[in-house]
Image (cartoon, rainbow, N blue to C red):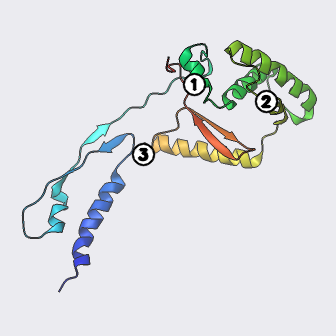
């Protein structure tokens, strides 16, 4: 006499392989089952001929980096979004300005000079964006060097996103990832020109 578990095993394996092949963003499988009328019971309902699959292609749209970095914060929707936007976005703008003007990143070897330059640039950048100049705290200028643990975390996230893009199995982050080395936490910010108005 055969065990009921052995009878269900082929059904389970078929269902498992079907779920394993499903894809999150690029390919969505819409599965419907048809009840097969015969005396073999549970197994016949989930046999290979009882499933039909339809591939549906999905497209995700991302804004350009230059558009995300030149957002206007003057509209009402942008002002509302500003309250929940991480200050790291604006810190990134200050660091980009430093790199553009100095041709290098802030260096621990010239700490006093670079810290003062960063504070001055912060005022100019935040004023040009139309946001409060106290949005970034003064102690931001003390974070200079690239710390190995932070680089490891951010590098791991970056490689994970590359795998997602190549395999097309999961949606990539949209569109900024900021990691706070002091708090040990990361946040994803979706900042695009079409902020709600």
In three-dimensional space, the C-alpha distance between marks 1 and 3, rounded to whole angstroms, equals 30 Å
Label 2 near label 1: C-beta < 8 Å?
A: no
Q: Marks 1 and 2, how far apart in space?
A: 19 Å
CA distance separating discs 3 and 2:
39 Å
What residue sits 15% from the left and 65% below the top? 44
Vertical relation: 149 (above or below) 84: below
40 to 108, vertically: above or below: below
For mark 3, what is the residue? 169
Secondary structure under the numbered disc 2 in the rendered image = loop
- Counting from the top left corner in percent of width and height, residue 172 is at 50, 39
Pick whichever of labels 1 and 2 is earlier in the sequence.
Answer: 1
- Residue displayed at 48% across by 40% down: 165
Left/right of residue 169 with respect to residue 119 in the rendered view:
left
Residue 50 x/y as whole percent: 16, 56
SS type, badge 1: helix
> On the rendered image, what quadrant is the N terminus found in?
bottom left
Which residue is at 78% across, 45% downward? 147
Question: In the image, 158: left or right of 39?
Answer: right
Q: Is residue 110 left or right of residue 192?
A: right
- Say which residue label 1 marks: 81
Q: Is residue 135 above or below residue 1?
A: above
Residue lying furthest bottom in this view? 1
Q: Which mark is residue 137?
A: 2
Q: Earlier in the sequence, mark 1 or mark 3?
A: 1
Badge 3 element: loop
Q: Do callouts 1 and 3 mark residues in contact (Cβ within 8 Å)? A: no
């Amino acid at each position: 006499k055969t065990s009921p578990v052995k009878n269900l095993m082929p059904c389970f394996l078929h269902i498992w392989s079907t779920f394993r092949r499903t894809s999150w963003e690029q390919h969505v499988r819409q599965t419907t089952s048809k009840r097969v009328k015969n005396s073999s019971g549970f197994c016949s309902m989930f046999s290979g001929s009882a499933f039909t699959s339809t591939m549906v292609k999905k497209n995700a749209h991302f804004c350009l980096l230059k558009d995300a970095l030149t957002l206007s914060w003057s509209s009402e929707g942008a002002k509302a979004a500003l309250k929940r936007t991480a200050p790291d976005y604006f810190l990134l703008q200050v660091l980009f300005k430093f790199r553009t003007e100095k041709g290098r990143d802030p260096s621990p070897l010239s700490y006093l000079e670079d810290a003062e330059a960063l504070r001055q640039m912060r005022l100019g950048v935040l004023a040009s964006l139309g946001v409060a100049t106290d949005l970034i705290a003064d102690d931001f200028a003390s974070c200079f060097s690239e710390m190995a643990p932070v680089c490891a975390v951010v590098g791991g996230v970056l490689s994970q996103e590359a795998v997602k893009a190549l395999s097309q199995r999961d949606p990539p982050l949209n569109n900024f990832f900021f990691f706070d080395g002091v708090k040990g936490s990361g946040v994803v910010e979706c900042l695009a020109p079409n902020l709600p108005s």
